[in-house]
Image (spheres, rainbow, N blue to C red):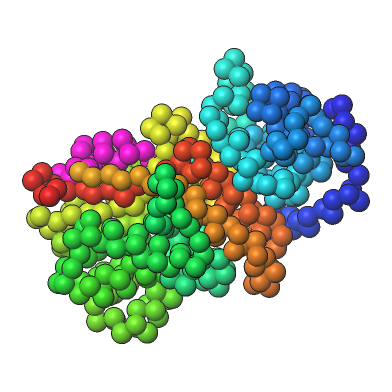
Amino acid sequence: MTQQAFHPAQQRPVPVDPARWPDVARVPDAPVRALVAERLLRRVAHRRRLRVELSGGRLLVPAPEGAPVLRLHRPEDFFHRIGATGLIGFGEAYQAGDWDSPDLVALLTELATAPETLVPTGAQWLRRLYVQRQPETERPSTANARRNIGRHYDLSNELFALFLDPTMTYSSAVFPTGPGGRPEAGWDTLVEAQHRKIDQLLDLARVGPGTRLLEIGTGWGELALRAAARGARVVSLTLSEEQLALARRRIAEAGQADRAEVRLCDYRAAEGEYDAVVSVEMIEAVGRPFWPVYFSTIDRVLAPGGRAALQAITMPHERMLASSETYTWILKYIFPGGLIPSVRAIAQTADRYTGLHLSYCRPYGAHYAETLRLWRERFAERGAEVAELGFDQVFRRMWELYLAYSEAGFRTGYLDVQQLLLTREGNAR
């Protein structure tokens, strides 16, 4: 290592509970890999023109003013973590406070642009040193799915209420578009934008008076409420007990309990026949081995002439294939067991295992970037209230990174979000 250790008085260490965060508390001892990680960061900083700041204002490599900033508080710990576990270590280093950035989204956006070029082609074999496989206990089988969902969605309804809008909608909104097709997003218009998204999906599925609607993935009940207000009869499935309780209460308070029912039920156990199926950003939690079961379930419960409208986060097909066996920081800490599909994978799975076909697809990733920006800013503003709920600093930094990372993914096009329609032959119109 060429730089001196960062003086601890210049950055107060993040208190880490080793029982709660064992891999954040433990710094791996990987001196050779740490040297490789340092050299790789030098290369990335030079090629991407990043400003990597060390103690005393020193730079890892020369960089222009105004470049995205990666500020290393504990360089040695940072490089050992990355050397040992790659991008998982990068995330854990942020949780531990080993690094920061004055503009986290700008830094992550630069790193998320053409990520396949970050590691030189001749050094791709290095991935084998740190890439991990998904633990069997997180595979989203029937036995594990409820635990996976609970780790994220059962954290606390009060936590989500701090940064979501009053509809408690935790998926991309659809904003009005201004010049150049850019979304015009603001906190004061987020409720309207979430209702626009829901209404577009309900319209796509042709939900109206008397429609028998199955919703796979309840959230906190806003779509079920809006469908019931149209006169539909809704059955909504969730594996989150926290969401179940609040969604049922909201439906009862709205006077729609006779039209909307929420069940604690795995999608694989869905029963009945429905004119429409709607599922919003739930397929990401299904897992690739279970996509055939997911689409077969939709096909099984969908009545003749029925329509299925999905909202799905997607990634380009080749990137999906390359990452499908990789255990990532997001999977370890945020969404265990999941995989973001590609549009091609959705279409191919439906074609192969069901009588359904993809007949409509509308992308709008820029709207998700703006939705995430609003959530991220709100989460930061209400950090003290998050702490009052009992979430420690490691958790808060974890969620700061998660929201910023996701926003960067949509800003670069590494991620997208789609509204899709699945129909049987002759039913697309």
User: Was residue 363 drawn as part of the magenta stretch in this picture?
Assistant: no
Q: Residue at x 22, y 73 (%)?
A: 230
Which is more toward the observer, 421 or 25?
421
Looking at the image, residue 340 sits to the left or right of residue 18; the answer is: left
- Residue 282 vs residue 127, the one in the foreground: 282
Looking at the image, the residue that sits furthest to the front is: 179
Q: Residue at x 64, y 34 (%)?
A: 86
Considering depth in this image, is 95 or 111 the residue closer to the camera? Answer: 111
Identify the residue shown where x is 48% and y is 57%.
185
**In-image side of 203 versus 86 (left or right):** left
Number of marks: 0
Whole-percent x and y of residue 72? 79, 40
Q: Residue 3: x, y in percent?
A: 87, 31
Q: Is residue 1 visible?
A: yes
Q: In this picture, is 253 found above or below 408?
A: below
**Quadrant including the N terminus:** top right
Judge whether 257 appears above or below 131 on screen. Answer: below
Instruction: Name the spot of residue 334 as percent of width and height, x first.
Output: 55, 52
- Image: 65 above or below 238: above
Where residue 125 appears, as percent x and y from the top left, is: 58, 20
Kindly identify the residue that appears in the image at 58 percent across and 32 percent down. 131
Please indicate whether residue 242 sits to the left or right of residue 130 in the image: left
Please check the rendered image and state whether residue 346 is part of the magenta-colored stretch, yes or no.
Answer: yes
Residue sticking out furthest to the top: 122
Toward the viewer: 147 or 101?
A: 101
Q: Which residues are magenta?
A: 340-358
Q: Is residue 193 left or right of residue 332?
A: left
